[in-house]
Image (cartoon, rainbow, N blue to C red):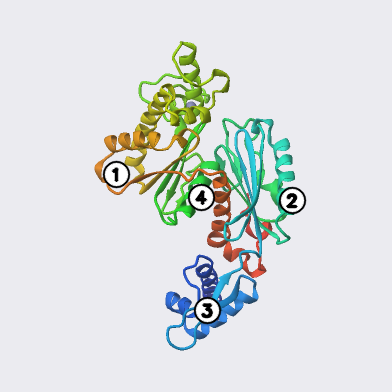
Amino acid sequence: MARDSTLRFAAQTDEVTSLLRIVNLVRTGEATTRPEIGRITGLGRGVVTQRVDQAIDMGFLADGDFGPSSGGRAPRTLHFRADQGRIIVCALGAVHIHVGVAALDGDVIAEVHRSWDISRGPADTLDVVMSMIDEVLERTGDAPVWAVSVGVPGPVDFETGRPVAPPIMPGWNGFDIRRRFEQRFGAPVWVDNDVNLLALGERAERNRHHADLIYIKIGTGIGAGLLSRGRIHRGANGSAGDIGHVRVPDADAPCRCGKIGCLEAVAGGWALVREAQARIDAGEASRLTPDELTTESIALAAEDGDALAIALLQASAKVVGGSIATLVNVFNPGVIVIGGAVASAGELYLAEVRQRVYELSLPLATRDLEILQSVNDRNAPLRGGAELAREQLFEVTFARWFADGRPTSERVSTPA
Ligand SMILES: [Zn+2]
């Protein structure tokens, strides 16, 4: 008896595994017809037909047009039903909130943006986020909410969805962000560090699903997202990639974290603003006006040829390049993507970083290394958040919820 039920269970597991694989092959575009599915999976024609019918019944796939024929009758194409559910994506920054709705294929179909100071704390901030969500949901039809993703500018314990001692988010330490959204939408919720999401966005944008990729954001602060074989490396406590606070040799500038000589205290946006102010006060010529000094205005002035702004950015790039070189030796990435407001000056910044990295890293570690400018558009954080939700839904938790036809927080959430 025991052996029988074990066998039955094994057969069932097999059936589920092949069903989920087939949905994912069509979802990712790796297969578009039943014969293609058969070729890739090695499953017999009858089994493929049965599983595809099941996936269609459950609402994951649908029949499309007839594909190209290779002799006989043309096979019918299949497509993934990306409009069956909606993904809510929230990107919280230090001074703004960006909320969007994406289809299940990751396409951002509506978004709304506003200024907001995150240090006002979780209760007020999430009230604002909820009303922004209402607004975008209203504009995007009535498909059920399948997932919510939330990006925050600080370290996150991914298992529980709580920020961990975030330096620029007073009042948020340990706050149960996930619960607030689960109660409201009944859908699974994932919370992650914003730079991790940007790294996932670049992975999708560049079609590098299995890349060893490092995304480095050089904005007001500095942080990195690490992808190992396409998967985020978060570390034991969620602080992996926090390179803004590695020590720069011989530097002694005080940092907002309380230590001295941190990378962002020398090369981050807030440090550049402080340095620009000091040099203008000391009489250095520049088109930068002291009352409008921001990371963005310095990057723009550099693009327009302002000597002070160029000098500041080159100094920043040189120091950042030094820290990246260390990271390259340790992690051996294939791709480094540089983003954020400081790096928006483009080639001016990138050229300096490249030179430092090649000068200081081991030749083997840089042999095939690409150092690229990020796409850096306004929707990048939303695409990254949608990417996280899609990965978690279809590659991590699919087996837990597929039988219901759609995900719920009850089925998906790991007990905290
Ligand atoms: Zn620091």
* Residue annotated with mark 3: 7
* Residue annotated with mark 4: 201
Q: Provide residue 13's location: percent of width, then percent of height.
A: 54, 73
The nearer-to-camera label among 2 and 3 is 2
Dot 4, how many residues are within 10 Å of its Cα: few (below 14), some (14-19), or many (20+)?
many
Say which of 360 and 21 sits in front.
Answer: 360
Q: Which amino acid type corresponds to the residue marked 4 in the rendered image?
A: Gly
Work out whether mark 3 precedes mark 1 in sequence or the reverse, and give the earlier one.
Answer: 3
Q: Which amino acid type corresponds to the residue marked 1 in the rendered image?
A: Thr
Work out whether mark 4 precedes mark 2 in sequence or the reverse, and give the earlier one.
Answer: 2
In the shown orientation, is residue 313 left or right of residue 48?
Answer: left
C-alpha separation, residue under disc 3 versus residue under disc 1: 50 Å
Q: Provide residue 175's location: percent of width, then percent of height.
A: 66, 39
In the shown orientation, is residue 22 left or right of residue 335?
Answer: right
Task: State the SS at label 1.
Answer: helix
* Residue annotated with mark 1: 366
Work out whether mark 4 precedes mark 1 in sequence or the reverse, and give the earlier one.
Answer: 4
Say which of 323 and 414 sits in front.
Answer: 323
